[in-house]
Image (tube, helix red, strand yellow):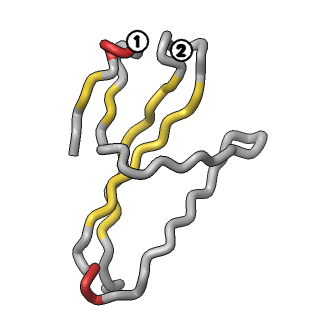
Amino acid sequence: MLFRSLTVFGAPGCFLNVDPLLLTLVFADPSGAVELQTNIPGSIALRGAQLWEQMAKWDFSVNALGIQPGNYARLIIGERSY
């Protein structure tokens, strides 16, 4: 997990919290909602694995970098307990 400040890139107060190994471009509907689907294989070997994600939006009015990153999320792969 990273906590890198994007101030040097022109986005003061913004942080990159995850390592950007995979980038996916998605488009929001007119209300601003986005549905992100992730396919995870049904393998017992993945039990307990963690996936980290962070969304960002293009907004050139916010800062010189032109992106506004959001909060990050952690997904833990496992079995349902109910």
Q: Does residue 15 appear to the left or right of 27 in the view shown? A: left
Q: Residue 16 placed where, x, y %?
A: 33, 33
Disc number placed over residue 62 in the picture, else none: 2
Numbered circle sitting on residue 10: 1
Query: Height in image: 63 above or below 38?
Result: above
Q: Position of residue 51 (x, y in %)?
A: 33, 61
Camera-near label (1 vs 2) is: 1
What type is the residue that disc 2 sits on? Val
Is 23 on the left or on the right of 79, as rendered? right
- Seen from the viewer's position, the closer of residues 64 and 62 is 64
Tell me which residue sits at (51%, 25%) in the image: 67
SS class, disc 1? loop
- Few, some or many residues within 10 Å of mark 1 (<14, 14–19, 20+): some
Picture quadrant of residue 60:
top right
Q: Secondary structure at mark 2?
A: loop
User: Is 70 left or right of 59, judged from the image as shown?
Assistant: left
The outermost residue toward the right is 30
User: Where is 6 relative to 39, above or below?
Assistant: above
